Amino acid sequence: MTRCYITIDTEYDFGFTRRTGANSRCANFDRSIACVTPGGAVGTVYQMDRFDAHGLKAVFFVDPMPALIWGVAAIEDVVGPIVARGHDVQLHIHTEWLELAGTSSPVGSRTGLNIKDFTFEEQCALLTYARNVLVAAGAPAPVAFRAGNYGANDDTLRALAEIGLAYDTSFCPGIAQSHCAISLDRAVRVPVMHQGVIEVPIGCIAGHGGTLRHAQVTAISAAETLAALHHHRRHGIDSFTLVSHSFELLSRDRSRVNEIVRRRFERLCAALEKAEGVATGTYADHPPAVAPTGATAGTPPFSPLRTGLRLAEQALANALYGAR
């Protein structure tokens, strides 16, 4: 059995609140979490509706940092429905929010785009603060973490181990120039023990000319995702991590439903329900295991047909809904 970890980075939009002011909590929730549009809401509740309809489980990596300006209630609004529906809540951090934190910051006047911009001790303080807010908001104690922008380093992993979180999934081999500074080679595609925690890489597929493409709902098609999962199953690889966001099904300006991406998401959910030898997994119920020594996921063989169809679909989506 290969487990597909559908991971949803669930976050308020820092840039929106920086532009519009601290009174923007409700508007930010509507555009980033609920994703309300004239064509309907396609945020976390809609995503869970589709997961539940197909018997799937997802992992919602929730960012508690907006509590710095809005309090725990802003995170309760996010966490409550996820826990009530039986999906998994884990920890996410966007340190950009420290810019607006004032005296509520756990690291004084220090700010930074990514968690890797802070010292080990500061990262411990940030992670402890965020974990405590997440639990205060009603989530079970988290065991897994993903850095905002994938912007973690080895100190992040050591800090996670220090405060008792066992898993990190910030390493993204499919993006050559990401913010991630974890000291692993991009050839690492399976869960490994690193710096005291289990690092679970983001999935990827083979691209043209030996390139890689990261496994994200807006980045690869449902057919490419299924091909990668079946490749993992044939090669005895236990897990594959797919990334999405609470706002993934919206146009770039978050004003409309991106119908092309929504159909891709719905096709994927339907296909996962029927996929032989594939099931969804969570960190609460079926956490990823360290791969045996020497195990390698590789990538499914490059498919000009699947890639060509996705590129055509992507071009149309970009033209209609804005390039991502």
Image (cartoon, rainbow, N blue to C red):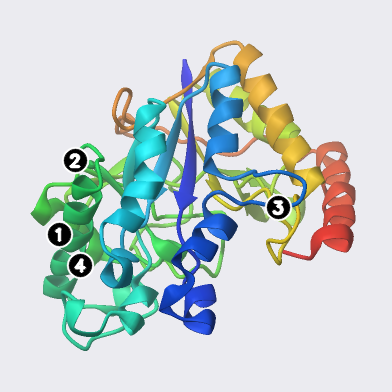
What crowding class fits label 1: few (fewer than 14 Cα within 10 Å), some (14-19), or many (20 or more)? some
Nearest to N terminus: mark 4 or mark 2: 4
Say which residue label 3 marks: 37
Looking at the rendered structure, the secondary structure element under dot 4 is helix
Amino acid on which disc 4 is placed: Leu
Q: Which mark is residue 141?
A: 2
Nearest to N terminus: mark 4 or mark 3: 3
Q: Which mark is residue 128?
A: 1
Measured in 3D between alpha carbons, the distance from the residue under mark 1 to the one under mark 2, in whole angstroms, is 11 Å
What crowding class fits label 2: few (fewer than 14 Cα within 10 Å), some (14-19), or many (20 or more)? some
Q: Are marks 1 and 4 in contact (CB under 8 Å)?
A: yes
Q: Residue at x 44, y 66 (%)?
A: 25
Rendered location of residue 17, percent (x, y) = 48, 75
Amino acid on which disc 3 is placed: Thr
Amino acid on which disc 1 is placed: Thr
> Can you name the residue that lies furthest to the bottom here?
109
Give the label, 4 or 3, closer to the camera: 3
Q: Is residue 246 left or right of residue 63?
A: right
